[in-house]
Image: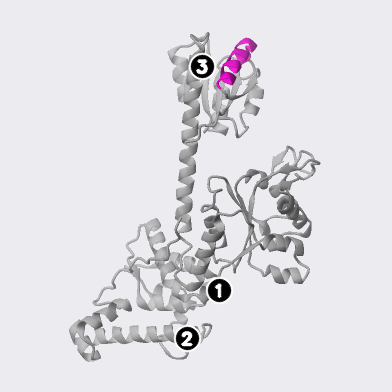
Amino acid sequence: MSKRPGKILVVDDDKVVLRAVTEILQREGYTVVAIDDAVEGLAASKDPTVDVAVLDIRMPHLSGMDLLRAIKQGRPEVEVVMMTAFATVETAVEAVKAGAYDYLTKPFSNIDEVSLTVAKALERKQLKDRTRVLEEQLSVKGQFEDLIGQSGQMRAVFKLVETVSYSSATVLIQGESGTGKELVARAIHYRSPRKDKPFIAVNCSALTETLLESELFGHVKGSFTGATANKKGLFEAADGGTIFLDEIGDVPPATQVRLLRVLQEGEVKRVGANDTIKVDVRVIAASNVDLNRAKDQGKFREDLFYRLNVITVSLPPLRDRPEDVPLLAGHFLRLYVGKMGKKVTGISPQAMEALVCHRWMGNVRELENVIERAVVLTSREVVDVEDLPQQLRESNGGGGDVEVLSLAHLPYAEAKRLAMRAFERRYLSALLEKSGHNVSSAARAAGVDRSNFRRLLKQYEVVRGPLQQPLQKPKPEPMSA
């Protein structure tokens, strides 16, 4: 746990007490902000670096109890210690109910009482901060599970992510919409030395030019209509960490110039300001358009392109890696079954065949939506073809020209492999059906010994009885932390 000195806000209208408490805490190495007005103290409490507030209960204009409640409402993580010369059980109980950590009685019996109480409050604050960081890291690990694949293309992506994570080099992620570009960016950040610092994602296409510049770089009061106060930009907020600029190909030319300055000089200038602010931020950008082509067409600055394109991660579309579809489908099935509490145990071979053969123009995001829809609609224990959208059912006609057309977007070798797998699965299913699901009888009809026939049934996930077998949990290629 971090043992940094901490920042303490002290608010008391009695200047003698204010000075005494300030000196006690400064001797302990704390940074102290001393204020003799409760209203000004409320404004100072909004500083995100304040850890502990020490407040007098009786003050003019705004009582210490009201100030305590206001601080807890705006920043509940701040620990508050109350001071009073009129200590009673009632005031102590009221203060604790309002969120105070402890209270001190004036005059202090000794100076150690003040420093010890503040030290304990700070330790509690830092412990809660550490817990929050760990919870965020666990949450991110859960999100990263969506980046699944066993294909050669995805194995190459995983290896590149591991390689580039430990540097601060700028990364450009290229890929169609829905391929998981933000998941890759998060994977890079949370495997880097910056993992305990902020990760901030920005969709550059969702904001107008003025709003985008204000969000990224901040602004000063009065710099434009509606700028009623100074505002810190996201580059400042991400200092020490990573900023993910999604859809960077949609950034206007003027903003591209400002981004170039950040990458070249490591500094930002708020909109309307004259001074620059140094920042240490790793930039990961992403685009679903070919930035190299956009550069050649004059739609994207050449110098910015080369600054961003230090390391490129290219995400393949899902239709080019059909072997990953069963893994992803199984993952999303378990995800939504868990969320909805339904007793759905797997996906039928026919439905999986339709999923594998589909073109997936919306990539992984489209597959996730299809599985979520199927889990919502199905009344069976196993998702079947009837639970899939119409366009997937039409591409799974069970043979003939429709099936061939559904594979036409794949390379010949891959299409042949999938077609053979589909044939063998249907052949085994037909044998089982004809034999009344008697494995020995079906094996004899196929001219295969019983143990090998069982192996084929397992390999092609063919049912052995009236009920479908549960989908086996996929084992995607893990990425070492």
Find residue 430 and report its image quarter. Answer: bottom left
Neighbor class of circle 3 (other Cα within 10 Å; few <14, some 14-19, many 20+) is many
Foreground: disc 1 or disc 2: 2
Residue occupied by mark 3 = 114
| Relative vertical location of residue 168 with respect to residue 18 in this rendering, above or below | below
Which amino acid does the dot numbered 3 rest on?
A: Val
Q: Position of residue 396 (x, y in %)?
A: 43, 82
The secondary element bearing badge 3 is classed as helix
Residue 397 makes an appearance in the image: no
Residue occupied by mark 1 = 361
Residue occupied by mark 2 = 413
In the drawing, does residue 200 fall left or right of residue 427? Answer: right
Q: Is residue 16 magenta?
A: yes
Using the numbered discs, state the Cα–Cα distance from disc 1 to disc 2 in whole angstroms: 21 Å
Q: Position of residue 371 (x, y in %)?
A: 44, 67
Neighbor class of circle 1 (other Cα within 10 Å; few <14, some 14-19, many 20+) is some
Give yes or no for contact between labels 1 and 2 (Cβ–Cβ under 8 Å).
Answer: no
Q: Is residue 263 magenta?
A: no
Which amino acid does the dot numbered 2 rest on?
A: Ala
Circle nearer the N terminus (1, 2)? 1
Specify the segment rendered in magenta: 12-28
Circle nearer the N terminus (2, 3)? 3
Residue at the spot 51% in from the left edge and 60% down from the top edge: 162
| Relative vertical location of residue 379 with respect to residue 459 in this rendering, above or below | above
In the drawing, does residue 426 fall left or right of residue 73? Answer: left
Residue 221 makes an appearance in the image: yes
Circle nearer the N terminus (3, 1)? 3
Q: Position of residue 268 (x, y in %)?
A: 73, 46
Find residue 223 and report its image quarter. Answer: top right
